[in-house]
Image (spheres, rainbow, N blue to C red):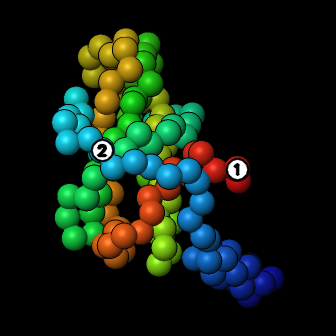
Amino acid sequence: MLAMLAMLAMLVLALAGCATPQGTPVPVCASDFEPVLPATPRAMTDRPQSIPVECYRVTGNARIEVGFFMPPGPQCLAVESVEVVESPDAVSLELRVGGIIDPLGACPEEELLWSVLVELNTPIQGREVLDAVGSAS
């Protein structure tokens, strides 16, 4: 029984590695792109939800900065994770935010432009960036 569970786990991991990027194209951020706050993914969130990616810009050899609008309060939200799927032709991103379990201070009551840095396995080099939230999957 334990051997079957191990084989099933390996199959799931193998299939996850075979995922192909899907979604709607994300534009390059305008030259005047200035997010209010940089975000760092954190695990102290509840009820995560996927939100749209607004734009991206290349900030390093295999790093992009992803711009998004953080939904307004009253609940304080934070980036929970960014799921990245890469292929030779495209990179898809699924940005997830959730409620902060123990917020410090007041939360913004309006939608604000934030950004998060995303490390890739290989440089963009002409690959299309896609927002997985816009996919039909």
Compare residues 130 and 112 and report the one nearer the observer: 130
Residue shown at 30% from the left, 44% from the top: 29
Q: Which disc is residue 29 wearing?
A: 2
Q: Is residue 66 visible?
A: no
The answer to whether residue 45 is above or below residue 4 is above
Report x, y in % for residue 3.
74, 87
Q: Quadrant of residue 103?
A: top left
Q: Nearer the viewer, mark 1 or mark 2?
A: 2
The answer to whether residue 105 is above or below residue 58 is above
Tell me: 60 left or right of 12. left
Give the residue type at disc 1: Ala
Label 1: how many residues lie within 10 Å, few (<14), some (14-19) or many (20+)?
A: few
- Mark 1–mark 2 Cα distance, whole angstroms, equals 24 Å
Compare residues 68 and 16 and report the one nearer the observer: 68
Residue shown at 42% from the left, 18% from the top: 72
Q: Mark 1 or mark 2, which has the lower sequence index?
A: 2
- Identify the element where label 1 is drawn: loop
Q: Which disc is residue 53 wearing?
A: none
Residue shown at 38% from the left, 20% from the top: 111
Label 2: how many residues lie within 10 Å, few (<14), some (14-19) or many (20+)?
A: some
Report x, y in % for residue 61.
22, 70
Residue shown at 45% from the left, 63% from the top: 128
Give the residue type at disc 2: Cys
Question: Which residue, given by chain and number where applicable, does mark 1 sit on?
Answer: 136
Q: Quadrant of residue 68?
A: top left
Location of the N terminus by quadrant is bottom right
Report x, y in % for residue 136.
70, 50
Tell me: 30 left or right of 133. left
